[in-house]
Amino acid sequence: MNRQTQAAVLLLIGVALLHGALTDLYLRYVKEGLRPLLLAAGTLLVVTALATAWYEWRRARREERGTGTGDGDGTGDGDGDGTRGHAHRESRVSWLLVLPLFALVLVAPPALGSYSATHTGTALQQPYGYAELPAGDPVPIGLVDYAGRAFYGHGRSLEGRSVRLTGFVAVTPSGTPYLVRMALNCCAADAQPVKIGLTGNIPPVLQPNAWLEVTGRYTARRTRDPVNDGPIPFLRVTAARPVPTPRDPYDETWNN
């Protein structure tokens, strides 16, 4: 690539980063806290691209003026080897580099769903402690938070309380329904599922990847994930309703 092409590609990358960071598209790739870094990186790339294009424009203008004041031997202010003004055409194949950028802007990939959840073991980790649940039932609580309280806290902080969770549906080959959130450390590449089993008043038809808001109570029932033998607590469902995919489909609870 020549520098004009490099500047164009840099500009497109920067615009794509800014587009993702200024909308919710970036949440399909990285955690919410990285938004300022994406904005800074996108801005830096755009500024670099514009500076490169300006520098090349100024250099071309200087060369044109130098050629116009040459001594008439056809070489301008060249180096005397007769190669002045000989241009090499850049391969158009290099422009294929911009295709992934258009895909990034125009096609929003879905968040990781039930396929990843059923083929990856639960990543439930023991928390350092449990904050006191606010008053009022049902109390909204993160799925990862509920799973930790139910298994490692033995449900002590959940006794007598009604909770409301949101997650997507995954169904095991044996037919066990799970409510799942993909827990995020940094980006979607390291996302891992945290699963809770559903029992009680479960909807008769469960569509994998469908998002549900589930109200229920703690139950001591638990099982082991067949993928990695990790712990999976259960929730006794009293009510469930479908909900749209949330703005941020990933759970960052264990980063807070």
Image (cartoon, rainbow, N blue to C red):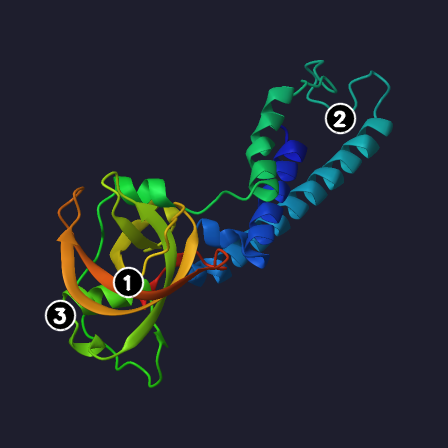
Q: Nearer the viewer, residue 205 or 188?
A: 205
Work out whether mark 2 precedes mark 3 in sequence or the reverse, and give the earlier one.
2
Work out whether mark 3 precedes mark 1 in sequence or the reverse, and give the earlier one.
1
Write the residue at 25% across / 58% down.
199
- Name the residue tied to disc 3: 154
Quadrant for the C terminus, please.
bottom left
Work out whether mark 2 precedes mark 1 in sequence or the reverse, and give the earlier one.
2
Quick one: which residue is furthest to the bottom in this view?
Answer: 135
Query: At which x and y percent is residue 253?
Result: 32, 65
**Three-letter code for the amino acid on which mark 2 is drawn:** Asp
Q: Is residue 203 above or below residue 99?
A: below
Res 81 → quadrant: top right
Q: Is residue 15 left or right of residue 236?
A: right
Quadrant for the N terminus, please.
top right
Q: Nearer the viewer, mark 2 or mark 3?
A: 3
Alpha-carbon distance for marks 2 and 3?
83 Å
Label number found at residue 77? 2
Alpha-carbon distance for marks 2 and 1?
70 Å
**Three-letter code for the amino acid on which mark 3 is drawn:** His
Do we see residue 121 in this rendering? yes
Q: Nearer the viewer, mark 2 or mark 1?
A: 1
Label number found at residue 144? 1
Q: Is residue 211 left or right of residue 73?
A: left
